[in-house]
Image (cartoon, rainbow, N blue to C red):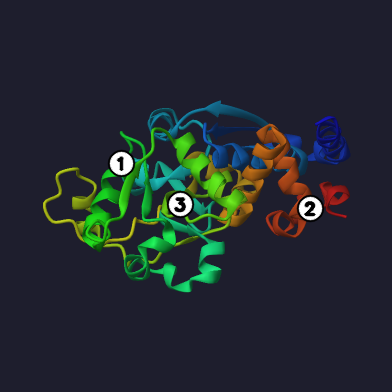
Amino acid sequence: MFKITIGLGCMFAAAITASAAQAETCGEVSLMQGDWGSAQIVTAVSKFLMEQGYGCNVTTVPLTTNPAMVSVSETGEPDILTEIWTNGAPAYKGLVDSGAIIPVTEVLSDGGVEGFFVPNYLLEKHPELATIEGIKANPELVGNRFHNCPEGWTCLNVSTNLLKASGLTDVGMENFVHGSGETLAASIAAAFEDKEPWFGFYWAPTSVLGKYPMTLVDIGSHDPERHACNITADCATPELSAFPRSEVVTVLSKDFMAENAAVSDLMTNLSFTNAQMGETLAWVEDKNASYDEGAVHFLTNNKDVWRSWLNNVARENLSALLK
């Protein structure tokens, strides 16, 4: 951890002098600081690049999604909402339609993904497990057990209804409801340690899927009406429908975008794949590192990715880090 901290200091020292010339043109920038892992990484990376590449004076504002929507609609602050999961933000569409906020990029280019997963080592031996029909025909290959969400999670209802709709309940698949998200994650780690069967619900990007390669099982396309019924515990006629892909975006306040073209362009370009984010989150967890250190890890190991996000001046300011 000492080496990581020294590396963080060296990166700042290498860029701070060169970026100072831009400080007057960039000025003050406020960033939403979400309390979940991927949002922490996005904000930390954005803050570093703004400060050291563009000379901005950046402050972060701890906010979850819906309070951030209220704040930006009422006060115009923060200037930038770095990571918004649109399927969990009822006010999002109205704010976009009104022009109060402007979405500039899908900051998670693969979107937020939920669904049924199986480990890749199972698929290598049994490729038929890539589809829900293949699992129904061979439930013993996944241990005759489905690892479901804890009580109180919306995905518990959806997954349970999908087990019924797919016929997996009829062939004796155990619907194992975990007591917490921690035990659900631990079951994956235990299965990978011994290369045992595993089949259940998870989502990406997460440190778990960054560490343990899994494949999303094909259960067909997403149907909004079917999914709306599957969300309810008393859905009378569950039917197959994939979980919706959540659009995960960065949005800027209207006023900030009009006044800060260079930083707006940076945030328009800034985007992570789920694999990149999952690997970074897994590194943070394995090293017991901070999210700031996770940002440094990403920047150190993905120079070709973030180089393309920058304008020429910022690229020159950060040239010592790009060698």
Regarding mark 1 in the picture, which secondary structure is present there? Answer: helix
The numbered mark at residue 316 is none
Image position of 226 with respect to 66: above or below: below
Q: Is residue 204 left or right of residue 6?
A: left
Say how many tags the image has.
Answer: 3
- Screen quadrant of the C terminus: bottom right
Q: Horizontal and vertical percent for residue 85?
A: 43, 45
Q: According to the image, label 3 marks what residue?
A: 112
Q: Name the secondary structure under disc 3.
A: loop
Residue in the foreground of this view, choosing between 266 and 67: 67
Q: Please, what is the three-letter code of the amino acid marked with disc 3? A: Gly
- Residue drawn 35% across and 56% down? 244
Near-viewer residue (13 or 197) = 197
Q: Secondary structure at mark 2?
A: helix
Q: Are marks 2 and 1 in contact (CB under 8 Å)?
A: no
Q: Which residue is mark 1?
A: 154
Quadrant of res 289: top right
Q: Say which label, 2 or 1, has the lower sequence index.
A: 1
Q: Earlier in the sequence, mark 1 or mark 3?
A: 3
Which residue ends up furthest to the left in the rendered image? Answer: 236
The residue lying at 28 percent from left, 61 percent from top is: 241
Which corner quadrant of the image does residue 116 belong to? bottom left
Q: Residues within 10 Å of mark 3 (few under 14, many from 20)?
A: some
Q: Position of residue 251 (x, y in %)?
A: 48, 45
Q: Tell me residue 58's x, y (percent).
A: 66, 31
